[in-house]
Amino acid sequence: MTKKVLGIYESGSIHWVGNAFHVRTMFPTHRLTHQAVSPFLLLDYAGPTEFPATERPRGVGEHPHRGFETVTIVYQGKVAHRDSGGNAGVVGPGDVHWMTAASGVVHEEYQEQEFARTGGTMEMVQLWVNLPKAHKMAAPAYQTLLSEQIPVVELDGGAGFVRVIAGEWEGQKGPARTFTPVHIYDLRLREGGTAELRLPSGGNTLLFLLRGSILLNGTNKLEGEAQIAHLDRQGESVSMAVQEDSLLLVLSGAPIEEPVAAYGPFVMNTQQELLQAMEDYRASRMGHLTAVR
Ligand code: MN
């Protein structure tokens, strides 16, 4: 059975995150609510933005998170990250940085020093993945998924290829460790190609087109840049006819059927837990970064 396209949407708000990431928020929006996108919480698409050379890297300074995971997928440019658990790393094109904030992390996200010095184009996605109640207060963790660790599956007929970041595609498993079942694919599609996307029934599925043009199920067109399709939970397949070279991020996951209480960088189940998160952060119980960058 075919998964129906329930809607195709443009971004919600457009704003700066720090001075490095000019983002379009694809969800949550009034159309794509928590319930429609669970277990995902937020998708910010940063760029493509051209930055002139500078000696001082742009970015977002020390800030906390609790109750979910942040997943940074880099398309262009380089991002340097550091957190209160003592983890640090740089991710570039094709790499993914998967941070499990869980009980609480304080971190910073900057453009990498050398990238800042020469300037260039920054393009990335930051996705927030919710944690079920049972794991919201688990120990924080950190995964750097380098491009070479991410399996690449060629599509039939030269339609392009799929990079399996999380979950699995035709038996190829993505490297990300996840708390609930999710599939995250980075698709690079060629004009004139056709492909069938097979996804489990019962999950929430979103197809985020960074740019290009794809006809879904022969009737619904995703085109231009920064458009997102929301698919029905029922059904297991979507057909794609690629009308221009396209860059597509596919997200699918089993919904977490629990209440969502969100405030800025904290996503919990109740207001009381949010207040506790704010108090724990103020009392330095989520740690701090060491002084030197
Ligand atoms: Mn952050």
Image: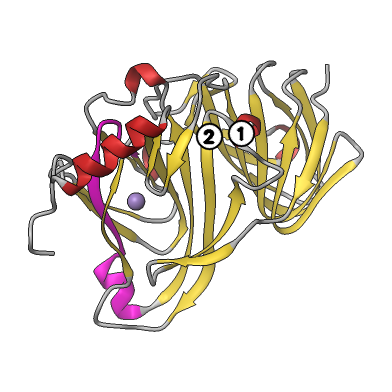
Q: Residue at x 38, y 78 (%)?
A: 119
| Mark 2 secondary-structure assignment | strand
Residue 67 visible, this orientation: no
Residue 151, position as x, y percentages in the image: 47, 33
| Mark 1 secondary-structure assignment | helix
Which residue type does callout 1 highlight?
Val
Ligand 1 neighbours mark 2 (CB distance < 8 Å): no
User: Quadrant of the image for the C terminus?
Assistant: bottom left
User: Quadrant of the image for the N terminus?
Assistant: top right
Q: Is residue 88 above or below residue 37?
A: below
Residue under numbered circle 2:
40
Magenta span contains residue 105: yes
4 relative to 30 in the view: left or right: right
The residues colored magenta run: 99-118
Residue under numbered circle 1:
37
Which residue type does callout 2 highlight?
Phe
Q: Is residue 264 above or below residue 3?
A: below
Q: Residue at x 33, y 26 (%)?
A: 136
Q: Residue at x 38, y 67 (%)?
A: 18
